Image: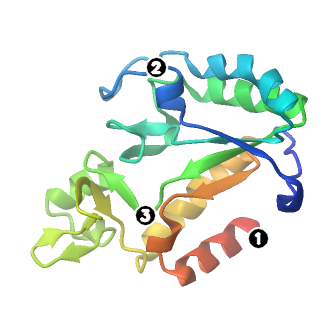
Amino acid sequence: MIERVGIDARHTVIWHVYPLGFVGAEPTCVADEAPHHRLPRLVDWLDYLAELGANVLQLGPVFDSESHGYDTRDHFRVDPRLGDDGDLTALVEAAHARGIGVLLDGVFNHVGRSFPMFQRAEAGDEEASAWFRRDGDAWAVFEGHGSLVALDHDSPAVADHVVAVMRHWLDRGIDGWRLDAAYAVPAGFWRGVIGEVRA
């Protein structure tokens, strides 16, 4: 396990980067595509980041997705357009060697249509359907974006999934999370999840 860097929000300068754009990744990702090891390009920028006085690298979405990163397909896999787990681990280790913490973008309000549990829901699986909100006869989507299917935060299975994802990456050395669309998720959900993650 990689030792984490302590982050004190009162004394933090964050450098935020959208990895898919920064490394020039393709606009769409093919499922089961072989990794393109592009995340290491960010290592070359860490000394510059330190020179700026930044002590946190906040990464936009890095998980396997269909297109822009906010349409997650697999929270436990690095987007192959960026590389693989080893590339992310190397980036975190290089940042930590410079005293720089790393935050990941937690997109837990919605998922992409190729998210496996949503594929099961589309096929009529009742257990899987409980993961997603409905809007009448249709699946609810995030702010009108048809490709972003809204998760049902009243579902214990969704909470368990988010806890598992957060712990998975924290155990691999990241220092914390930026929560995407946190305003759209009930505060009680975050309280429960964060309490479990910190336990």
Residue 125 x, y percent position in the rendering: 20, 64
Dot 1, crowdedness within 10 Å: few (<14), some or many (≥20)? few
Identify the amino acid type marked 1.
Ala
Q: Quadrant of the N terminus?
A: top right
Q: Residue furthest front?
A: 52
- At a point 76% along the width and 70% down the height, the residue shown is 199
Disc number at residue 109?
3
Query: How far separated are the C-alphas under marks 3 and 2?
Result: 26 Å
Which of 122/14 is in front?
A: 14
- Name which of mark 3 and mark 2 comes first in the sequence: 2
Residue 28 x, y percent position in the rendering: 31, 28
- At a point 59% along the width and 63% down the height, the residue shown is 163
Mark in the foreground, 1 or 3: 3
Q: On the rendered structure, is 30 left or right of 59? A: left
Mark in the foreground, 3 or 2: 2
Residue 146 x, y percent position in the rendering: 20, 55
Identify the amino acid type marked 3.
Asn
Q: Secondary structure at mark 3?
A: loop
- Name which of mark 1 and mark 2 comes first in the sequence: 2
Q: Secondary structure at mark 1?
A: loop
Provide the residue designation for mark 1: 199
Query: How far separated are the C-alphas under marks 1 and 3?
Result: 22 Å
Identify the amino acid type marked 2.
Gly
Vertical arrangement, residue 141 with respect to residue 90, above or below: below
Dot 2, crowdedness within 10 Å: few (<14), some or many (≥20)? few
Mark in the foreground, 1 or 2: 2
Vertical arrangement, residue 172 with respect to residue 83, above or below: below
- At a point 21% along the width and 61% down the height, the residue shown is 121
- At a point 47% along the width and 28% down the height, the residue shown is 21
Dot 3, crowdedness within 10 Å: few (<14), some or many (≥20)? many
Residue 14 x, y percent position in the rendering: 74, 45
Provide the residue designation for mark 2: 24
